[in-house]
Image (cartoon, rainbow, N blue to C red):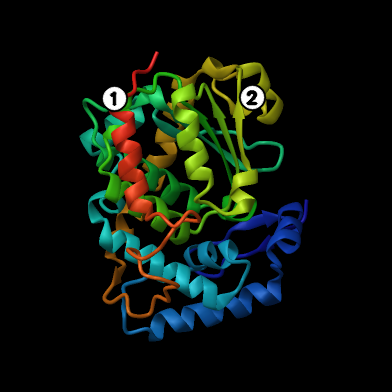
Amino acid sequence: MKETKVLEEGGVALLPESLLKIAKRELREDKCTREQSLEQLRNWVLKNEDLQNVRCDDTFLLRFLRAKKFSVPMAEQTLLKYLNIRRTFPHMATKLDFLEPRLSDVIEQGYIFAVPKRDKHGRRVVIINAKGLNPKLHTSCDQAKAHFLTYECLMEDQETQITGLSHVGDFAGVTTSHVTNWNPTEFARIFKWGEQSLPMRHKEIHLINVPSTLKWLIDFVKNRVSSKMKNRLIIYGSEKELMKGVDAECLPQEMGGTMPMRQMIELWKQELAAKRDMILALDESILLSDRGIQRRSSYNSEKTSTGTNFVSQIESIEGSFRKLEFD
């Protein structure tokens, strides 16, 4: 299979021709566009007085260019927002050391991990397993850090930048404490900012074992995302149905797949170990000012389609959940 050099700095990534065809078809990426866009974005980073110690290697910059289909102005904005979410929520988005005891325990319990094999579309599949998070032991900060760590690790891979991610969420074992573990205002901000700030291509979201008491929350979340994302979110009633939408090799044995979850977690820990230093070094990148971020409207004034403030709706949801009892 023909291979093409994509990286010129910090190593050489060899991507198969079939993958470059996907990049061309879905991202408008070719050699000329890639090289010109990288040069423009790199020059902008180096000249921007609000940025300090920001990585300029191809792999890092391509995160943002590919996520925005090589619109350099949009990639610039996403990079600023990415640095801003790290600056605004340092307790959740920085110091992502998988060896830190609390974060290590969340990973060890299998709350979130990427399956070793790619699906038929070449995507990595992220498993989110509610049973792996004990809200009596772990805080919303621990939970958020596990998500940020997972995505930082996966965004370092150029193939994943091109093909995107699929998610499988298993809600078996969810309790009221899982929801009320979050401060509603912080959840609202993380939810809103995360969708805009992390340069990832979320292709599919598969949910299983969703309690009836949670389905209206899922509907609420669906109303907050783009119509494209809304159409990519599917709820299944059984593992048999789930396996029609997700390759069996991309599911743990406990969910109808082939490989035991424990083995998948151990392989994921090896990936995290290999990229540990690189992920920790991201903390050196600093946004000195957010003045360059273009905002359509202020956070506090943003309204939902029904005219109700998003934070107020989250607070209402939290109050309702405190009254619920899960089977």
Location of the C terminus by quadrant is top left
Compare residues 267 and 22 and report the one nearer the observer.
Answer: 22
In the rendered image, is residue 276 in sight? no
- Mark 1 residue element: loop
Q: Quadrant of residue 44?
A: bottom left
Going by the numbered disc 1, the residue's amino acid type is Asn
Outermost residue, top side: 327
Q: Position of residue 189 (x, y in %)?
A: 34, 54
Q: Which residue is mark 1?
A: 134
- Mark 2 residue element: helix
Mark 1 or mark 2: name the one nearer the start of the chain. Answer: 1
- The answer to whether residue 64 is above or below residue 130 is below
Residue at 57% across / 61% down in the picture?
67
Q: Quadrant of residue 20?
A: bottom right
Outermost residue, front side: 307
Q: Which residue is mark 2?
A: 242
Residue at 29% across / 45% down in the picture?
184
Q: Position of residue 108 (x, y in %)?
A: 34, 27
Going by the numbered disc 2, the residue's amino acid type is Leu
Do residues under tags 1 and 2 come within 8 Å of each other at their CB atoms? no
Compare residues 175 and 143 and report the one nearer the observer.
Answer: 175
In the rendered image, is residue 151 in sight? yes
> Label 1 to label 2, Cα distance in Å?
25 Å
Within 10 angstroms of label 2, few (less than 14), some, or many (20 or more) residues?
Answer: many
- The answer to whether residue 217 is above or below residue 229 is above
Within 10 angstroms of label 1, few (less than 14), some, or many (20 or more) residues?
Answer: some
Residue at 65% across / 30% down in the picture?
246
